[in-house]
């Protein structure tokens, strides 16, 4: 959180501690003496020890060895006389003590980063340096300070150590140069936040595991890339710096696990890449082994094991990943592969550059992290496009399934209409035969056979040309007129500028409403005109079909009149309404109007169907 606060201070110019240039560091000469004693005590300070210049030490430090460092302040006495307190800038040692003069005796203060109660603090915007406050009269023999230090996190060259004397704390000297070093990390933070939120949202919406694993991968990867630089771990683990270090160095293992599962689900390796699927599970199993080892090594405080795992195991894992990617290059089976390849290779290449171009003394690989930052940014951007592409495919697939389901539903509903209509028509023919009306029966049979043939020929299509629909309606109405001895009249009108040959509507969508108007509206009427009118008109992109009768109206039909038969559900009307609703093209696709005169008496019923035509 310290870096975030510093970011806002620098951006908005708050405070008076911003400087154009960093204060000048005054390098302190020092000598080193390797310590074989394990006890850290003021009585063991090797004041007369055989100290040697750091240039004489060619070997690297070992996690098992302590070193005594003697700082010589001979040339800095003017600074001590002019200041009540100064600050010592030094490498951040994992364990260490500073020995100085106080109250006529040698005293020590803890300065190790992993030591409890350490009085040193890491310098903001610096990866490897800390500072500790010095007293003006704290020099031993008015010349020296002694440090007993140990490095356990990596193997470091002693020649990499530096010590400087500062007149004021580095924490009060934030500069614009500090911001320039950190703005890529703040930009990467924003990128990760946006992509993490979007992938997590897609997971809750689609419930696809690849989105969950990738959102988790982004979160863990962000901690690995920026956790040390932006001091995020300090905010989480407070003063437990040792645990913080173990987790910061191990979190990449968890990122690899999440990436592996994302890789499996995103590419569908089980179905499309069975060999890669097996390889990925081998890699996962291998990754879980060092994760368990790291837990055990932490409990036994065996730092060499962590260093070895980070140095060699990651290279083996990445080599296996690269092998799988090479296989996919020559065996790509879906579009997702073309997102995986550039994204994964950008990360692998950036990681290799991150390791290869690291300073030999940069044991934590922090100063070369810009390479990793760039590679991870490209990877996240490419995969974000790839995941959005997969969402697009998912929506298209769902839309196709819905369309297929709608088509099958429409066919099923139409299949219910045809038997219903044919059954009624045969009943009508039976009535004519019973009445021994040979002429009408033959005419009826001729019309009926033509109508049935047209119905059967059109049964394979969901829609019919308006021309065919009008012809079938005309045949049907003529059949019904013959059946009931011309008890009603009818007409079918079509707007002249409608191309009836190319305009298509749902097959036999009007017939059930016309049948209902005849049976329940016109035939029960005892006096007055009995007329059925069907009109087809265009209104914009809608074909409006109006079925208008002069019958008794729906209210009279509900009463027990002389024509009222046993109440039963009108199956044809029900199916037609379902067909209109299932089309989903308009929200108000049909309307039923009860016509009444000025006195409120029924004058018939009007049904209005609004159909989106297909030309």
Image (cartoon, rainbow, N blue to C red):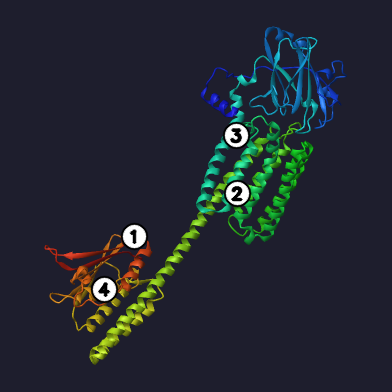
- The answer to whether 483 is drawn above or below residue 14 in the figure is below
Q: Secondary structure at mark 4?
A: helix
**Which mark identifies residue 185?**
3
Q: For marks 4 and 2, give the CA distance.
A: 58 Å
Q: Secondary structure at mark 2?
A: helix
Q: Secondary structure at mark 1?
A: loop
Which quadrant of the figure has residue 527?
A: bottom left
Q: For marks 3 and 4, give the CA distance.
A: 73 Å
> Mark 1 touching mark 4, by CB under 8 A?
no
Residue 379 seen in this snapshot? no
Decide: few, some or many residues near mark 4? Use Cα within 10 Å; few <14, some 14-19, many ≥20.
Answer: some
Q: Secondary structure at mark 3?
A: helix
Q: For marks 1 and 3, give the CA distance.
A: 51 Å
Numbered circles on residues, count: 4
Q: Which residue is mark 1?
A: 586
Decide: few, some or many residues near mark 3? Use Cα within 10 Å; few <14, some 14-19, many ≥20.
Answer: many
Q: Quadrant of the C terminus?
A: bottom left
- The answer to whether 417 is drawn above or below residue 88 in the figure is below
Decide: few, some or many residues near mark 1? Use Cα within 10 Å; few <14, some 14-19, many ≥20.
Answer: some
Question: Earlier along the polypeptide chain: callout 4 or callout 2?
Answer: 2
Nearest to viewer (mark 2 / mark 1): 2
Q: Foreground residue, 233 or 116?
A: 116
**Which mark identifies residue 516?**
4
> Mark 3 touching mark 2, by CB under 8 A?
no
Question: Earlier along the polypeptide chain: callout 1 or callout 3?
Answer: 3
Decide: few, some or many residues near mark 2? Use Cα within 10 Å; few <14, some 14-19, many ≥20.
Answer: many
Question: Earlier along the polypeptide chain: callout 1 or callout 4?
Answer: 4
Relative horizontal placement of residue 389, taking residue 44 as reference (left or right): left
**Which mark identifies residue 213?**
2
Q: For marks 1 and 4, give the CA distance.
A: 23 Å
Relative horizontal placement of residue 341, taking residue 563 as reference (left or right): right
């Amino acid at each position: 959180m310290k870096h975030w606060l510093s970011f806002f201070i620098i951006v908005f110019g708050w405070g008076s501690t911003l400087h154009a240039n960093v204060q000048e560091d005054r390098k302190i000469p020092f000598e080193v003496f390797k310590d074989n004693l394990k006890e850290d005590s003021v009585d063991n300070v090797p004041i007369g020890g055989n100290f040697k210049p750091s240039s004489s030490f060619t070997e690297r430090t070992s996690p098992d060895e302590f070193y005594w460092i003697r700082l010589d302040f001979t040339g800095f006495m003017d600074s001590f006389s002019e200041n009540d307190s100064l600050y010592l800038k030094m490498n951040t040692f994992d364990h260490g003590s500073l020995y100085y003069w106080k109250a006529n005796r040698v005293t020590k203060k803890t300065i190790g980063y992993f030591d409890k109660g350490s009085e040193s603090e890491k310098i903001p915007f610096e990866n490897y340096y800390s500072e500790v406050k010095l007293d003006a009269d704290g020099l031993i023999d008015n010349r020296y300070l002694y440090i007993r230090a140990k490095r356990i996190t990596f193997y470091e060259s002693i020649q990499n150590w530096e010590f400087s004397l500062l007149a004021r704390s580095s924490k009060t000297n934030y500069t614009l140069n500090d911001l320039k070093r950190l703005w890529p990390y703040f930009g990467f933070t924003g990128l990760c936040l946006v992509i993490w939120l979007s992938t997590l949202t897609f997971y809750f919406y689609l419930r696809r595991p690849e989105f969950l694993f990738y959102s988790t991968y982004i979160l863990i990867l962000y901690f690995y890339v920026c956790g040390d630089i932006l001091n995020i771990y300090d905010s989480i683990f407070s003063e437990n710096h040792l645990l913080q270090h173990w987790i910061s160095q191990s979190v990449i293992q968890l990122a690899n696990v999440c990436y592996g599962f994302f890789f499996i689900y995103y590419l569908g390796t089980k179905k499309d890449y069975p060999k890669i699927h097996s390889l990925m599970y081998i890699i996962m199993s291998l990754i879980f082994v060092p994760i368990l080892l790291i837990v055990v090594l932490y409990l036994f405080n065996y730092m060499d094991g962590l260093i070895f795992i980070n140095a060699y195991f990651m290279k083996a894992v990445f080599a296996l990943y690269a092998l799988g990617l090479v296989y996919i290059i020559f065996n790509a089976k879906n579009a997702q592969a073309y997102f995986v390849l550039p994204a994964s290779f950008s990360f692998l290449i950036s990681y290799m550059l991150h390791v290869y171009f690291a300073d030999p003394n940069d044991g934590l690989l922090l100063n070369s992290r810009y390479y990793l930052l760039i590679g991870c940014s490209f990877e996240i951007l490419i995969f974000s496009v790839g995941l959005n592409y997969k969402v697009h495919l998912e929506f298209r697939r769902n839309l196709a399934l819905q369309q297929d389901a709608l088509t099958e539903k429409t066919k099923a509903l139409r299949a219910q209409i045809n038997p219903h209509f044919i059954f009624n028509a045969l009943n009508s023919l039976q009535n004519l035969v019973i009445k021994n009306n040979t002429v009408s029966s033959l005419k009826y049979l001729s019309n009926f056979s033509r109508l049935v043939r047209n119905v059967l020929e059109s049964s394979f299509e969901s829609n019919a040309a308006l021309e065919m629909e009008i012809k079938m309606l005309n045949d049907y109405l003529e059949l019904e007129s013959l059946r009931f001895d011309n008890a009603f009249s009818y007409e079918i009108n079509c707007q002249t500028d409608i191309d009836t040959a190319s305009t298509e509507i749902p097959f036999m969508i009007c017939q059930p409403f016309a049948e209902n108007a005849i049976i329940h509206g016109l035939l029960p009427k005892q006096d007055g005109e009995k007329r059925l009118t069907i009109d087809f008109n265009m209104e914009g992109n809608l074909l409006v079909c109006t079925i208008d009768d002069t019958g008794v109206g729906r209210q009279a039909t509900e009463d027990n009149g002389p024509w009222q038969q046993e109440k039963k559900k009108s199956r044809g009307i029900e199916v037609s309404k379902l067909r209109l609703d299932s089309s989903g093209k308009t929200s108000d696709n049909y309307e039923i109007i009860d016509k009444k005169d000025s006195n409120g008496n029924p004058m018939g019923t009007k049904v209005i169907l609004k159909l989106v035509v297909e030309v």
